[in-house]
Amino acid sequence: MALDFATTYKILVLGDSNVGKTCIVHRYCDEKYYDTYISTIGIDFKQKLINLDGVPVKLQIWDTAGQERFRTLTTAYYRGAMGILLMYDVTNLESFNNLSYWLRNIHENASPDVVTVLAGNKCECQPPQRMVEKIRGEKLAENFEIPFFEVSCKQDVNIEESFITLARRIRDQRDRRGESFDQDGNAQDTGSANGLSNSFMLGGRGSENSRCAC
């Protein structure tokens, strides 16, 4: 008999362009790593069914475009989001510095109860490639009281741990608030998701292959 995955957690993956957002979604949902990718245009999403401490949960993971021209579009998808995986690239100092923009954007557009996890991608890289030391990510996460992981999409380091931590915190938040936490925009989000496939979101993917940023 098929399980009824009635519980759905909507998760956004945010951060600058080319920090590895698409790569982390593919690594977690498809268990694959791609050396090349096609740039995300607008929004894309995938779904993953997980067993969260014995309870079946569906994660609806929205991969957002980081380019500035799409950021206004991205804000529309904050509605109903329960969790956010905020990413930067440890080899790109600008992507770390721009976290202040993304954190402000989350504060202005997301639910006050949204759960955030910070992830620094490409942790396999060493100096001189590495531009952001781990301690800087740890301090930022400590200041905002959010979990922090250094991850590697290429070597599959801390990918599952990041999403499971996010899912557990969403569950705990729901338990504290009750069912109202995931009903704020659930009807609208379900309708949006049902009208879009995993490979088509507001224009789908770009037409040119790019070097994978993960």
Image (cartoon, grey):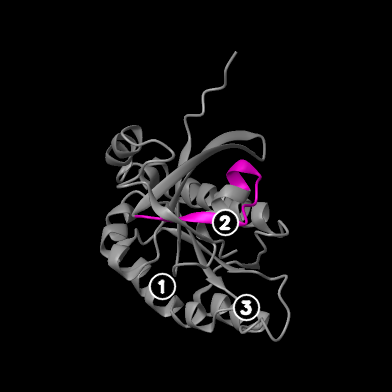
Instruction: Give left or right: position of 105 versus 93.
Output: left
Category of crowding for the residue at label 3, using alpha-carbon neighbours closer than 10 angstroms: few (below 14), some (14–19), many (at least 20): some
Residue beneath the point at 73% across and 59% down: 155
- Residue 206 pos. (x, y %): 39, 53
- Residue 198 pos. (x, y %): 44, 39
Asked if the residues shown at circle 2 and circle 3 are in contact, with their CB atoms under 8 angstroms apart, the answer is no
Residue beneath the point at 56% across and 61% down: 212
Amino acid on which disc 3 is placed:
Glu
Category of crowding for the residue at label 2, using alpha-carbon neighbours closer than 10 angstroms: few (below 14), some (14–19), many (at least 20): few
Amino acid on which disc 1 is placed:
Leu
- Total marks in image: 3
Q: Disc 2 designates what residue?
A: 36
Instruction: Give left or right: position of 19 versus 43.
Output: right
> Is residue 33 one of those drawn in magenta?
yes
Q: Is residue 110 visible?
A: yes
Nearer the N terminus, badge 1 or badge 3? Answer: 1
Q: Which residues are magenta?
A: 28-41
Q: Which of the two marks, 2 or 3, is nearer to us in this view?
A: 2
Residue beneath the point at 31% across and 33% down: 195
- The circle drawn on residue 103 is 1
